[in-house]
Image (tube, helix red, strand yellow):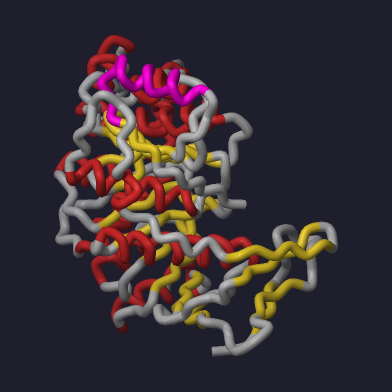
Amino acid sequence: MAKELPLKYGCNPNQSPARIFMREGELPLKVLSGRPGYINFLDALNGWQLVRELKASLKLPAAASFKHVSPAGAAVGLPLSDTLRGSCFAGDGELSPLACAYARARGSDRMSSFGDWIALSEVCDVSTARLIGREVSDGVIAPGYEPEALAILSAKRKGAYNVVEIDPLYEPAALERKMCFGVTFEQGRNALAVDETMLSNVVTKAKEIPADARRDLTLSLITLKYTQSNSVCYAVDGQAIGVGAGQQSRIHCTRLAGGKADVWWLRQHPKALGLPFQKGLGRPDRDNAIDVYVSGDAGDVLGGAVWGKYFTHRPEPLAADEKREWLGKLGGVSLGSDAFFPFGDNIDRAARSGVSYIAQPGGSIRDDHVIASCDRYGIVMAFTGVRLFHH
């Protein structure tokens, strides 16, 4: 391990010189392939923290798909249904639990995950490497790589693909520092353990949170711990399905994340799964076409001769009433918020995307109104008492 690594440049090409380094000791990572940049390492280190906490809390392999220092998706290694395999482009081959975790994480928001940084909680196996090899991404961080998996990844992008190995035993110092405009900030590292014990203070009339919802609420809260605030995360079946990050208002977080959750679910509609793509059409083009097809802008894809770029023949549109009917089937969704909900409009929007369970800090002067909104929908809400801002 080295004490420092020089970088090509910082956040932007005009920001040089740039490096990562340790004030004391050696870096807890090494580059096995490629030349990661400044933002790559920010994504890698935030992503690694997220997946290692998911594994520690939920006792399952975990993966995250990071873009610009926030997760586009995060998941644990539960098996994929045939429908989910189709919407994630995961193929029909055997997938390890770790590969399932990454397929889910990448499949949460495939549009945003284009060119992602991948974080894996386990030694990368061949199954996972093959899945990563088919996707457009910038790099991966993991505690190790099987030899054949490393060979697959190192050959990606003509040998320029970024592969980073991190020491799984590394623990950072209790104090962390960063600079802004020449001023140094210092604070205690957020080492708070997020687990199901945070869900004990249920404040709504509905009280029961089943085991799978407790898992999903925990996943959403851990995801939020490494998402630029304000942030809201929808989760179901062991994966994030919509992350709203970096918004100035809570309702915009809820709307953004809810819209992503809706697209995730609509991608599993039989019509979306059966779209007649042109042979050889790349995954990014398929992703873009599907998102436009299900998002309400199908005319952009189907109008004129545009559809011919993507499909062998003009597909049947997904009508508004079909969308409403399909979205009405989404339920049992869990939602986490990194800070309190100040208004019940967040609950109204969450209910439209099948939310049944909510975990949020509480502490607003309008808590009673938010609780009443949950009671109208039969939503179970727990106050965690813990804010999870991340900047």
Q: Within the image, what quadrant is residue 175 found in?
A: bottom right
Q: Report the predominant secondary structure element of the magenta stretch.
A: helix
Residue at x 28%, y 10% (from the top left corner): 321
Left or right of 24 in this view: 139: left
Residue at x 52%, y 82% (from the top left corner): 28
Q: Is residue 373 magenta?
A: yes
Residue 268: horizontal and vertical position, in percent? Answer: 25, 33
Residue at x 79%, y 69% (from the top left corner): 16
Left or right of 390 in this view: 357: left
Residue 334: horizontal and vertical position, in percent? Answer: 31, 37
Q: Looking at the image, which is closer to me, 389 or 30?
A: 389
Q: Within the image, what quadrant is residue 273 found in?
A: top left
Q: Looking at the image, which is closer to me, 284 or 235?
A: 235
Left or right of 114 in this view: 74: left
Residue 351: horizontal and vertical position, in percent? Answer: 34, 22
Q: Is residue 364 above or below residue 179?
A: above
Residue 144: horizontal and vertical position, in percent? Answer: 36, 79
Residue at x 25%, y 21% (from the top left corner): 378
Q: Quadrant of the N terminus?
A: bottom right
Q: Looking at the image, which is closer to me, 242 or 112?
A: 242
Q: Is residue 212 magenta?
A: no
Left or right of 169 in this view: 238: left
Q: Is residue 20 above or below residue 128?
A: below
| Magenta part of the chain | 366-380
